[in-house]
Amino acid sequence: MSDLEVLFAHAYLVAQDKRPLGFMHPLPPLQPAEVAAWLQQEAGAAVRVWDSTFRLSLESFEVACSRGRPRMAWIHTHPTTRSSALELMAIARRTGAVVVAGGPDAGLRPEEYLRGGADAVVPGEGEDATLQLLLALRAAHHRPSPELLDRVPGLHYLDDQGQLRRSAGKARTIDLERLPWPLREPDSTRIHLERWRDHRKYRPLALASARGCPLPCGYCSASVFGRPYRRRAPREVADEVRRLADRFEFDRLVFTDEVFLFDRLWLREFADALKSGPRVPFEGCAHPGALPVDLLARLAEAGLTRVELDAASGSSRLLSSLDWSYGPADVYRAVSAVRGAGINLGLRVMVGLPGEDRSDLDATMEMVRVAGPDGVEVTRVDPGSPALFRKDWERVVGGPLAERTERRLPRPVLQTAADWLLLNGGNEPDDPTAASRGLMSRVRRPLLRAAIRLLPGR
């Protein structure tokens, strides 16, 4: 019998992505590494995090399960990797492991994953529910039953009649001060970073300074952390930055916080804490209405190299109707401030919002043209989803690799947006693709260097 108790995995494989490798830059989700570190600290569990990104096929997961014989397999789920995650669950079940589904998609669609092979679904943050489940399984010789699952707070499961149930009680929210840093296995982390260098891409490493989001938006799923908002001490985060810089060779740290740039006091202390070591490049996202413009120069000196700006839409009418806390004017002011500080700019927009018509889409594309970002990340809203959205990242990057392979780009962002509106009953009866082709010439330069990032930091 193997000593491996819990095997953590996510389900994205570059080899199965139909888009050109030169335009992808997925970050492995942090959540499996965070939950793994918690089980190791609190229960002394033997854990392993399996990174699927550069595996040739899912058969390699079967090899990992056959060799490790884990008692539990914890699979991170996301809408873009749903089918692969279900395959991983089937593989784990065949090797006798108890299968647990975590991550945003399973939390939103628990019944689909339970009927697809999961014994339990862990919604939200995952640390406490997974720990309590592991302890209960130990006492039951790792034999799950509806009675056992019902005693663990915060789980979804199927009862003896195959009906979806939610266990009594609620999983505890763990104080961030108690949580260990994510479990990063040195060999797999270095392999991941070096593979991107093989393709002449910058090598990013993800980390988080907070959980939840402090700002209201018109459209939010809150599918993992939600509220309340909690943030780690700035000096502790700076310590992790320095530790990562000592352990791994990377080109940039990416903060996966819902909003990273907004708390002036925290950011000032964080920038000061970074002064004691070598400059480490990092990036984070911001809401236009809460961007601390007076601190941008200071943060740039500390290492801030890129700001991902959540622009949502270029339509004032649409944002106002959905109760957004900012408008296009705030976006333009934030763009000017970021550019003025000499910081690389990424723009995040949404298409397919409720009530969106052609004029709203045109306003968004015009905003992209005027802002001239170094990158665009498009989220397509799916009214049929429990979270009301599905993320399909189309991120723009510059550089010789993208320029050389421009002819192999996936479908243009604007074409995708127009098709999406047509599919979901856009208000304009005319053919949206014809208009999109005309508009593409105005936004061609930033959008024709697209890269795909399919996995969220979480």
Image: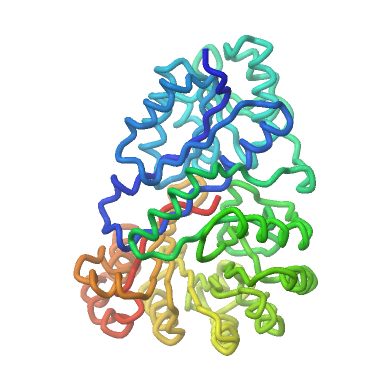
Which image quarter: residue 199? bottom left
Q: Residue at x 67, y 36 (%)?
A: 127
Q: What colour scheme governs how the chains and residues are painted in the rendered image of this protein?
A: rainbow
Q: Residue at x 40, y 59 (%)?
A: 25
Residue 241 seen in the current view: yes
Percent across and percent down for residue 340 are 58, 90
Q: Is residue 143 left or right of residue 455?
A: right
The picture places residue 285, in percent across and down from the top left corner, at 58, 68
Q: Is residue 104 above or below residue 142?
A: below
Q: How many labels sit on residues?
A: 0
At 47% from the left edge and 22% from the top edge, which residue is drawn?
68
- Left of 361 or right of it: where is 221? right
**Picture quadrant of residue 26:** bottom left
Q: Position of residue 172 (x, y in %)?
A: 75, 36
Residue 425 seen from this side = no
Q: Is residue 84 above or below residue 166?
A: below
Relative to residue 440, is residue 24 depicted above or below? above
x and y percentages locating residue 262 in the rendered image: 70, 71
Q: From what the image shows, is residue 15 above or below residue 345?
A: above
Dividing the picture into quadrants, the one containing residue 24 is bottom left
The one of 230 and 14 positioned closer to us in this rendering: 14
Residue drawn where x is 52% and y is 34% of the image:
8
